[in-house]
Amino acid sequence: MRRYGILVVLMAACVFVSCAERQQVQPPLTPAAVLEGFDVPECALVDPQTGFTYVSNIEATPETYWSDNGKGSVSRLRSDGTMDARRWIDSSPEFVLNSPKGMCILDRRLYVADNTRILVFSLDSGRPVNALAVDGAKRLNDMATDGKHVYVSDTQAGRVLRVDGSGQGGYEAVAELESVNGIAFDGERMYAVSWDLHEVYQIDRSGKQPPQPFGLAEHFANLDGIEVLDDGSFIVSDFVGNKVVRISKDRRTVTTLAELKTPADIGWDRANRRLFVPQLTADKLAIYHLP
């Protein structure tokens, strides 16, 4: 009986240590700045070449987030985090925006997910370059680039698409993932989060292997954005969970960095270790310095 009791205690201790390794508690970070005046901000994107940060504004009510309503804009912040132009890009009769969301930069062009299209703008002038219709698209959401192509998630269709970076509009599906939302790259490795599955995945861009889950779904409600840091750890935003967390490189430890209302598609300033967090329903952008 004594040996059995000792065994039970040891097993319980092992379970306790395993849980402790998976979730870490620390005081949430305080934002270095909080900017207001946005209109349903969805995505923040930092241009590493200039230091400008771009913020997409959906400018719609919840029931029309995915409607072609002819509204939307992109704000631009200076490298010091202050507002440069609230409506740096604006919807117009000549070039309509419809609730713009995720963005990425390739070859000095800004790519913007716009419901069922991808809009392309010159980063030098802000002028429109192209509007790419994506056949069969339902709800294009986040965007990312590997330096050669641009990729976009279709949340409703559950697909990740690779798009011809030359702007010709050709595309192919590289992954099937239910309610896929945020996508990001770390070198050649691609990652994504699922809104309904509450999980983080590594994506095989060849399409030969299904997305590989991290096994951390119990920690999250509905995931939105994802970024990869230089040390190989991950930052994800939990929109419904009202928090931004860091996942260790070994994918075992989850640490809450910030608690705030409806964090959407986060942006990472690698050079200055700043995290830009759009608060979609609060019309704010929080800026954090990561130690």
Image (tube, helix red, strand yellow):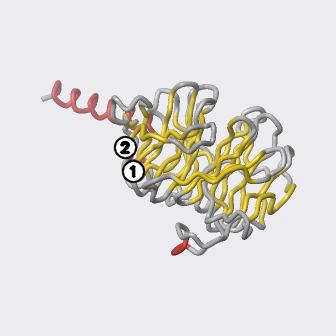
Q: Is residue 264 visible from the viewing direction of this image?
A: no
SS under mark 1: loop
Look at label 2 and name its amino acid. Glu
Q: Please state the horizontal and vertical placement of residue 98, each as a whole percent of the image.
A: 62, 65
Q: Is residue 242 left or right of residue 41?
A: left
Seen at 56% across and 33% down, the residue is 185
Mark 1 neighbour density, 10 Å: few (under 14) some (14–19) many (20 or more) = some
Marking on residue 176: 2
Q: CA distance from mark 1 to mark 2?
A: 6 Å
Q: Please state the horizontal and vertical placement of residue 110, each as a whole percent of the image.
A: 70, 46
Disc 1 target residue: 158
Mark 2 neighbour density, 10 Å: few (under 14) some (14–19) many (20 or more) = some
Seen at 60% across and 36% down, the residue is 145
Q: Nearer the viewer, residue 78 or 71?
A: 71
Look at label 1 and name its amino acid. Gly
Residue contact at pointers 1 and 2, CB within 8 angstroms: yes
Q: Nearer the viewer, residue 105 or 4?
A: 105
Residue that sits furthest to the front in the current view: 168
SS under mark 2: strand
Location of the N terminus by quadrant is: top left
- Residue 186, above or below 59: above
Q: Please state the horizontal and vertical placement of residue 27, each as a whole percent of the image.
A: 63, 47
The part of the image, by quadrant, that contains residue 69 is bottom right
Location of the C terminus by quadrant is: top right
Could you tell which of marks 1 and 2 lies nearer the N-terminus?
1
Q: Please state the horizontal and vertical placement of residue 125, each as a whole percent of the image.
A: 84, 49
Seen at 64% across and 27% down, the residue is 230
